[in-house]
Image (spheres, rainbow, N blue to C red):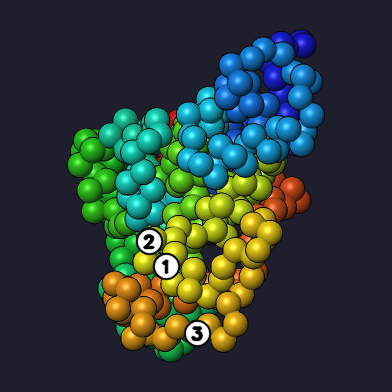
Amino acid sequence: METRRATIPAAEEILGGYFPVLDHGFVSLIDYMGGDDAIEQAARVSYGYGTRTQSHTRGLIRYLRRHLHTTPSEMVELKFHCAMPIFVARQWIRHRTASVNEYSGRYSLMPLLFYRPEYEQFALQTESNRQGREAASADRDVYDRAVGWWDETRERSSDTYGWLVENDVARELARIDLPLSTYTQWYWKIDLHNLMHFLTLRVDSHAQWEIRCYGEVMAGMLKRLAPLSYEAWIDYQVCGARVGRSELEILRELVGVDDSGDGLVARDGATIGSEDMKKLGLSGREIRELIAKLDTGERVDFDLDIAQMLPAEEFESRMREAVPGDYD
């Protein structure tokens, strides 16, 4: 059956496909409304496709993103089906700009699937931040002992849950001792602007590695749905940086406008030390952050590996097999 609705071939290719994340999780793009063309239409309050060239569309989308005109991007919506450990879901739900419907452990039996980090991700607490982990892994012996304790805890929690359910204890009570590593799932619908804000925070190196894995898959889906918006998001938000008044003053000390008025020129012999920057109002932390902004970094990109896509039935089967007892 033909549709009058605008479709995007690259998005249609992955629609309803399930991409594995972590050991038992997934992300699936279930539905969408609009793409780059919808943003242009909303911005120009016009009708019909093909009235502008792609270069015009690209320029407009980049202008909107650069100047924080967000409403046109809010006209595009995406709906995802996701499964993640509860501790990831608790971080995720802090973004209050989406519509969410989560799996109900009061109504349904919980699939007893638990997240176990690989050794490479089992790291010590960072010394430079109250949250986060070091890059290097902890001792292997510590990891092996932790895995043993986790397995004991999860086995006992699973046995308790199954026993309570078998004895007709209310499911809302039977679940209360399941650990934060237990997988939950939800449908999550969000507009494109707020999705990009979510992804900016969650693909950042400061975000917890586990939620970054989800963000990177969703960023790859965004690239297929709205490639021009994705490009602008990468350039201005992921790889770009906000600069404050004092930071601008420092940069003006180093770079000026040339005589033609349409170019830049480095000021001869211009240098500025940390003490000079402090006199302009920057704290030690702000100085370090400015230097980090100017540090040459690679342009990141998020490509979706189509070979990883699985049918919904694959994950449905895994979830059903993890439900305790013999229930239909």
Count of numbered circles on the image: 3
Label 2 vs label 1: CA separation? 6 Å
Neighbor class of circle 3 (other Cα within 10 Å; few <14, some 14-19, many 20+) is few
Three-letter code, disc 2: Arg
Numbered circle sitting on residue 249: 1
Task: Work out whether 268 lies above or below 54.
Answer: below
Residue displayed at 54% across by 45% down: 66
Q: Which residue is mark 3?
A: 271
Between discs 3 and 1, the one toward the N terminus: 1
Q: In the depicted view, which residue is nearer to us: 220 or 269?
A: 269
Question: Could one spot residue 146 in this view of the protein?
Answer: no
Numbered circle sitting on residue 245: 2
Neighbor class of circle 1 (other Cα within 10 Å; few <14, some 14-19, many 20+) is some
Give the secondary structure at mark 3.
loop
Between discs 3 and 2, the one toward the N terminus: 2
Image x and y of residue 218, in percent: 57, 46
On-image quarter of the N terminus: top right
Give the secondary structure at mark 2.
helix
Give the secondary structure at mark 1.
helix
Label 3 vs label 2: CA separation? 18 Å
Tell whether 17 sits left or right of 27.
right
On-image quarter of the C terminus: top left
Q: In the depicted view, which residue is nearer to us: 67 or 120?
A: 67
Three-letter code, disc 1: Glu
Q: Are marks 3 and 2 in contact (CB under 8 Å)?
A: no
Three-letter code, disc 3: Thr
Residue displayed at 33% across by 50% down: 90
Residue displayed at 57% across by 60% down: 239
Image x and y of residue 149, in percent: 33, 74
